[in-house]
Image: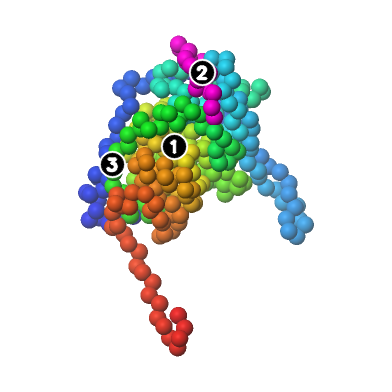
Amino acid sequence: MSTPGHAAAQQNLLPREVELSEHRYRPSMSQEGLSPTHPVTALDEQGKSRQVHVAGESPLTLYVDGREIVTLMTLGTHPEALTIGYLRNQRFIQELKQIKDVSVDWRSESVQVSTWEGIAGWDEKLKKRTVTTGCGQGTVFSCTLDALYTVSLPEVSVYQSIIYGLLDNIRQQNEIYKRAGAVHGCGLCRQTDILLFVEDVGRHNAADAIAGSMWLEYLAGADKIFYTTGRLTSEIVMKTAQMGIPVLLSRSGVTNMGLELAQELGVIMIARAKGKHFLVYNGAENIIYDARPQQQHHKILNGQT
């Protein structure tokens, strides 16, 4: 955490919250979140029976105005927010107020989205898709890539003490992972506060659910940090930029394409972040080192270190 002397400075860590709209429209939505885990019996290494939990995984086919778009494999805890966030991050829908209704039906394993005036150009939007490295296979459409470079992220500074404070708070999350494993977690954070934390079988789903929740709660991204337990691929960088978030933090590693895209879009990329260790892959000039850990000094005695 930061020292008291930095309290005033950290007020300017990132731009102040900006409301996306004065009129907080919300579409009609079902509330069909599933239980994230299921009890099962397994045998341990001693051959003893144990009661444990496994993560849920369900297909959810997304329809917009009756047209099939994609099937998502998901934990199913936030299906409505996931649906809205997916449409947002793929740039299929530009504004929340375009959506009239979101209705999830697990019996048919589907979610029906209706819009007020329809969405033009579906054939063009869907003609080319890229299967990404996202867990459970993510998909990026050509219209998403075309719109990506219109994103403009704010120039921000990040204090080292904020990174440490946030990592410390993140350890209190990951409840589903602690119970069953097999999931990734993503968090929407402001300084050291975790505003939203979502776990899913794929980190891209968790990111989309956060994107949907941001729209529904009218949260801007300019003063936020996006945290993920997963690797920082090009897809996660895209989603972070689409949400207008300038800082990306992960405990995992980075891919080459993810780094190149972060450099092109101006996303501050911090990875391999655990304890007091982290690596800044992009945006090093934006990091303020106000909490450098004490270096370990090795004494050489009798030729040994």
User: Marks 2 and 3: which is nearer the front?
Assistant: 2
Q: Amino acid at mark 2?
A: Trp
Between the residue at mark 3 and the residue at mark 1, the CA separation in whole angstroms equals: 17 Å
Q: Which mark is residue 219?
A: none
User: Who's the residue at 41% across and 18% down the image?
Assistant: 97
On the image, the x and y values in percent for residue 229 come to 50, 47
**Quadrant in which residue 75 is drawn:** top right
Measure how far apart labels 2 and 3 are at the Cα level. Answer: 35 Å
Q: Residue furthest right?
A: 47
In magenta stretch: residue 255: no
Residue at horizontal 40%, vertical 77%? 298
Residue matched to label 2:
122
User: Picture coordinates of residue 96 (x, y %)?
Assistant: 42, 22
Find residue 155 and name its label: 3
Above or below: residue 193 compared with residue 73: below
The vertical placement of 28 against 189, above or below, is above
Q: Are marks 3 and 1 in contact (CB under 8 Å)?
A: no
Whether residue 117 is in magenta: the answer is yes
The span from disc 1 to disc 2 (Cα, nearest Å) is: 21 Å
Indicate which disc residue 238 carries.
Answer: 1
- The range drawn in magenta is 112-129
